[in-house]
Amino acid sequence: MLEKSAPAFAFGENWARFLTSLSDAQIEEATRAVSTLVGRDLRDTTFLDIGSGSGLSSLAARRLGARVRSFDYDAQSVACTQELRQRFFPGDDAWTVAQGSVLDQPFLATLGQFDIVYSWGVLHHTGQMWHAIENAARLVRPGGLFIIGIYNFRGGRRGTAAWARLKRWYCTAPRYVVASRCDRLAGWLSVRSRHARRDPGIREAEIQLRTDKTKHQPASGRQ
Ligand SMILES: C[S@@+](CC[C@H](N)C(=O)[O-])C[C@H]1O[C@@H](n2cnc3c(N)ncnc32)[C@H](O)[C@@H]1O
């Protein structure tokens, strides 16, 4: 069961909207894309989808015959992946979906290793990209494939550094703060980027946030 009060970042809401408009053509396209990217027969392979988001890549891998394990930090994204599993592979024990973080070592230790570890558009969102890459890479079995998609560096006041700060905060802040403030903070960060030069008080507020010592322990292993 999903925990109803788990944190909700904007991605989750996007996925909920996505569910209402998902077409067969999109599923076919995703399946072709995953097949091309992996470049090998997925039948009877084990496939870990880190940061599954909508669950579309997981669905594609399952359709291609892999045994799939999906997880995401965000409860709504997990719910979206669960919904795809329920729609297309109801009761299937070769596809499991959990809530967890790629930064949460105890959770990762429960997963084992996989023939294919896939994480598309995720690891740079954690706020600790290199740490996340190392954690994910350890989940690849010897001789397996490690497939990641990360965005290019963006300079400027609204670039990569600003977003890394927000993502780091999202993955480490106390849960009640994340749940109530995250969307507003995303807006705030963007405003801050635009006005930082004019308002030094904004920098001070940011430093206070970054020095909050109360660490959020991400949820682990819930179905
Ligand atoms: C841009 S979406 C990509 C989703 C999916 N992989 C895709 O290609 O559509 C980024 C996803 O990463 C997830 N995410 C962010 N931080 C994470 C973390 N620490 N552990 C696991 N997932 C995380 C978000 O919740 C979100 O679903």
Image: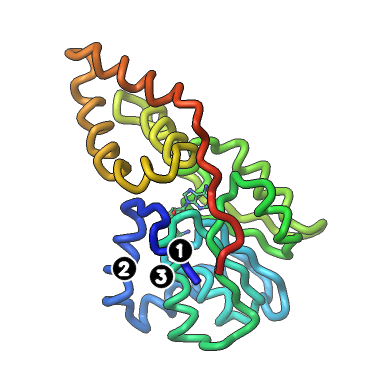
At 67% from the left and 71% from the top, the residue drawn is 40
Q: Position of residue 26 (x, y in %)?
A: 37, 76
In the foreground, 15 or 154 = 15
Check disc 2 and report the residue beneath it. Answer: 16
Q: Are marks 3 and 2 in contact (CB under 8 Å)?
A: yes
> For the residue labelled by badge 2, is the local secondary structure a helix, a strand or a loop?
helix
**Marked residue nearer the N-terminal end (3 or 2):** 2
Rounded to the nearest angstrom, the CA distance separating label 2 from label 1 is 16 Å
**Which of disc 1 and disc 3 is earlier in sequence?**
1
Q: Are marks 2 and 1 in contact (CB under 8 Å)?
A: no
Residue 151 in picture, x, y percent from top left: 45, 43
Which of the image's four quarters has the C terminus?
Answer: bottom right
177 vs 61: above or below: above
Q: Viewer-proximal residue, 7 or 130? A: 7
Q: Pointer 1: residues within 10 angstroms few (<14), some, or many (20+)? A: few
Q: Name the amino acid type tagged 2.
A: Ala
The kind of residue on which mark 1 rests is: Glu
Q: According to the image, what is the colour scheme of the structure?
A: rainbow
Element on which disc 1 rests:
loop
Residue sitting at x 49%, y 54%: 73
At 38% across and 26% down in the image, what residue appears?
209
Q: Percent x, y for residue 78?
A: 46, 65
Residues under labels 3 and 1: Cα distance?
Answer: 14 Å
| Horizontal arrangement in the rendering, residue 62 relative to residue 165 (left or right) | right
Q: Would you say 192 lies left or right of 220 here? A: left
Q: Given this view, does label 2 or label 1 mark the residue nearer the observer?
A: 1
- Quadrant of the rendered image containing residue 62: bottom right
Q: Is mark 3 within 8 Å of ligand 1?
A: no
- The disc placed on residue 80 is 3
Identify the mark at residue 3; answer none if there is no mark.
Answer: 1
Assign a secondary structure to mark 3.
helix
